[in-house]
Image (cartoon, helix red, strand yellow):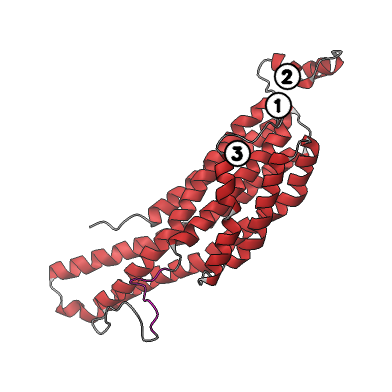
Amino acid sequence: MSRMRGWARAVPGASLAFVLALLPGCKTPGSYREPVAQFQKGNTEASAALGQYYSELNRFERDLYLDERLYDAGLEVLATDAAGQPTALVGKLFSPESIQARMDAIALLGVYAERLATLAGAENAGKLPEGATALGTQLGALGQKLQTLAGKGDATASKYVEPVTTLVGVVGSLFLESRQGQALQKAIEQGSPQVNAIIDLLERDMVEVLGPQRLTGAKQALASRVMFYNLHRDKLSLAERRAVLDDIRRASDDYEALVVANPVELARALRDAHEALLHFARSERKLESFEELSAAMQSFQGRVDTAAAAVQRINAPPKE
């Protein structure tokens, strides 16, 4: 292959893309479309899995609230607490609007990444693809939506506002920029810091809020069952003891699944995939660059599949 590359450089007037197209097993610059499509698929799956993780936390908190009352007859089931605030029975840690806003933020990362790779890998960056206008309108209002959610009690929404709003502006300008080189430079210098900031916030949500809260809840659910059994085992029939012990076993399995599962890996996989796209954008468009990008996107897809399966497992409904 090295001799063939040398021959390609020696051919007068032959473009690299043309020569690569003639070489068996070699890919042209247009081959960027395959890894980008793979990234978009992984990005969509990561968004769905993270959305499920966010939304299932509300159900988990409600189940935990009822669980406490199942094993402690002294506790009432109430819609509001003594301060008049909604209990976990009807309240939500994350509203559907808050969950959708974070999924939209991940979608924004996908739009940015697609444009970055297109600018870096295409001979002609092309026009705004069909359907992107509607998506742009939806994402354009995302900063305002997050600002509104912050005013409604979403504890971390306000931190998303600046990087999301800035990245929306960068992405919009990338589609309007007629000079491909300038657009690519803008994507790298202005867009990538905002991407990292958004991914950092998603990771912080899971590391500091979602993960500990859910793990603590699962540990509490297991402890309440164990305490109930130890206090009442001498009063329970064989069948009742078997039922409670089966319940303890399921709670233990749930706790173990949460300890082993690592949904934050979805955010970390997104960060690494964006870093690979950024490296590709900064590199010369050589065959090795496309091969590295393709390998990185395959790794990204594998990590997303593994983490999404873990999220699916911990969110699976309890067996009867």
Q: Mark 3 points at which residue?
A: 297
Q: Does the magenta stretch include residue 289?
A: no
Q: Do the residues labelled 1 and 3 touch (CB within 8 Å)?
A: no
Residue 224 horizontal/vertical position (percent): 32, 75
Residue stretch in magenta: 84-92
Q: Nearer the viewer, residue 145 or 25?
A: 145
Estimate the spatial distance between the alpha carbons at disc 1 and disc 3, rounded to whole Å: 16 Å
Q: Residue at x 71, y 40 (%)?
A: 176
Q: Indicate which disc, 3 or 2, sits on the residue closer to the N terminus.
A: 2
* Number of on-image labels: 3
In the image, residue 30 above or below residue 36: above
Instruction: Identify residue type, mark 1.
Output: Pro
* Residue type beneath disc 3: Met
Mark whose residue sits in front, 1 or 2: 1
Residue 132: mark:
none
Q: Under tag 2, what secondary structure?
A: helix
Q: What is the magenta segment's predominant secondary structure?
A: loop
Left or right: where 290 falls relative to 239: right
In the picture, measured across the screen, residue 87 lies left or right of residue 38, that is: left
Indicate the position of residue 186 as horizontal and vertical percent values: 77, 46
Q: Earlier in the sequence, mark 1 or mark 2?
A: 2
Q: Return the disc, 1 or 3, that comes first in the chain's sequence.
A: 1
Q: In which quarter of the image is residue 135?
A: top right
Rate crowding at label 1 as few (under 14), some (14 to 19) or many (20 or more) other CA atoms within 10 Å.
Answer: many
Please give the residue where the numbered disc 2 appears in the rendered image.
20
- Give the percent coordinates (x, y) of residue 102: 53, 57
Q: Let me know if residue 207 appears in the view.
A: no
Q: Which amino acid is tagged 2? A: Leu
Query: Disc 1 vs disc 2: Cβ atoms closer than 8 Å?
Result: yes
